[in-house]
């Protein structure tokens, strides 16, 4: 592999709870326990650029196991204690995207990119900064919305990667409902290698479409997109009175994203953040066949590609 290329690794492809989910007896979870479907950890992505650029998009509760499965994120043999992780980009304040930060408390100071609204939620409701300051410390970075900016490492170092955030619809997470929902609570990230021009879009939580998102999707060479639900009422088939996909802040594959992604010219189109109930997880399902026919990959832990 050329060091000039961005390498993307899906650390975890499942939505909150993983596959199998510990308290779920749906068909997919049962099949995963029997070894018939590949198990998945919770959603997180590693962006690996050049010799030392190692960034995470979201930090799932399963992050320690994901690091153990990814040598690029492990300390070198000459390092008694440390991490090559340069920073973490949070798409929102959902627990399944931030809980892994607590596992990183055993390392050095963290550099975390998140919008002001997401930071306010994490600090006001969870006291995250106070908790991490008692261990490793945390530096918050406001991601750029207007244009690309250097994606700097934990020591301020700059490599070939630049990035920008794309504002998406959506309010605060469930644990923060009821507070004033002002500000930008959810974003996607576009990451570009200035050396090669390769572009990646990571959008695991998409509640609705806008022009900025559509433009970024059209311009990207790799798109990692919200594959949470196949249909709007999917959860209600396993849990009475469960919220719909729209109420949980996700567009569906069947009604919306399949047609959009199918038309993109991106070389890599991958669904991530897939709920354990989603029928696309079953290799023999007609839903999986429809996704494959559209040129889209159903994401899995350890999936890698280069841009």
Image: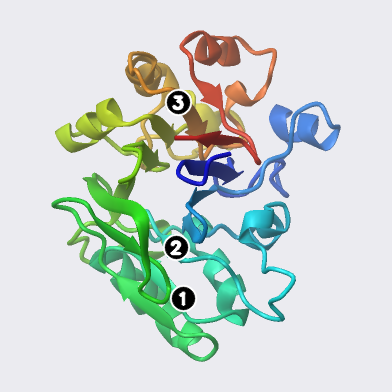
Disc 1 vs disc 2: Cβ atoms closer than 8 Å? yes
Q: Describe the element under mark 3 as helix, strand or loop.
A: strand
Residue 88 is tagged as 2
Query: Which image quarter holds the C terminus?
Result: top left
Disc 1 vs disc 3: Cβ atoms closer than 8 Å? no
Mark 3 → mark 2, Cα distance in angstroms: 22 Å
Residue 233 image offset from top left, x and y in percent = 46, 27
Residue 26 visible in image: no
Q: Earlier in the sequence, mark 1 or mark 2?
A: 2
Would you name the residue on which mark 3 appears?
269
Mark 1 → mark 2, Cα distance in angstroms: 8 Å
Q: Earlier in the sequence, mark 1 or mark 3?
A: 1
Would you name the residue on which mark 1 appears?
110
Q: Would you say 68 lies left or right of 243 here?
A: right
**Which residue is painted at 56% across and 43% down in the image?**
9
Residue 129 image offset from top left, x and y in percent = 41, 82
């Amino acid at each position: 592999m050329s060091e000039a290329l961005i390498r993307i690794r899906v650390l975890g492809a499942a939505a909150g709870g993983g596959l199998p989910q510990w308290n779920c007896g749906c068909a997919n979870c049962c099949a995963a326990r029997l070894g018939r479907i590949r198990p998945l950890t919770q959603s997180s992505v590693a962006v690996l650029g050049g010799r030392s650029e190692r960034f995470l998009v979201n930090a799932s509760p399963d992050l320690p196991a994901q690091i153990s499965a990814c040598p690029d994120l492990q300390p070198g043999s000459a390092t008694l204690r440390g991490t090559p992780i340069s920073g973490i980009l949070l798409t929102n304040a959902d627990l399944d995207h931030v809980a892994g930060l607590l596992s990183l408390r055993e390392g050095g100071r963290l550099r975390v990119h998140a919008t002001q609204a997401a930071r306010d939620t994490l600090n006001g409701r969870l006291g995250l900064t106070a908790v991490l300051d008692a261990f490793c410390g945390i530096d918050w970075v406001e991601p750029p919305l207007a244009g690309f900016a250097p994606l700097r490492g934990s020591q301020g170092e700059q490599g070939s990667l630049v990035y920008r955030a794309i504002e998406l619809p959506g309010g605060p997470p469930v644990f923060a409902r009821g507070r004033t929902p002002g500000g930008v609570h959810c974003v996607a990230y576009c990451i570009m290698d200035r050396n090669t021009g390769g572009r990646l879009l990571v959008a695991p939580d998409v509640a609705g479409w806008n022009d900025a998102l559509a433009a970024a999707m059209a311009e990207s060479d790799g798109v990692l997109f919200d594959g949470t639900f196949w249909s709007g009422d999917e959860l209600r088939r396993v849990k009475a009175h469960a919220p719909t996909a729209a109420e949980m802040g996700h567009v569906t594959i069947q009604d919306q994203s399949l047609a959009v992604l199918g038309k993109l010219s991106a070389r890599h189109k991958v669904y991530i953040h897939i709920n354990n109930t989603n029928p696309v997880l079953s290799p023999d399902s007609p839903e999986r066949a429809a996704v494959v026919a559209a040129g889209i990959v159903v994401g899995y832990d350890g999936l890698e590609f280069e841009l």
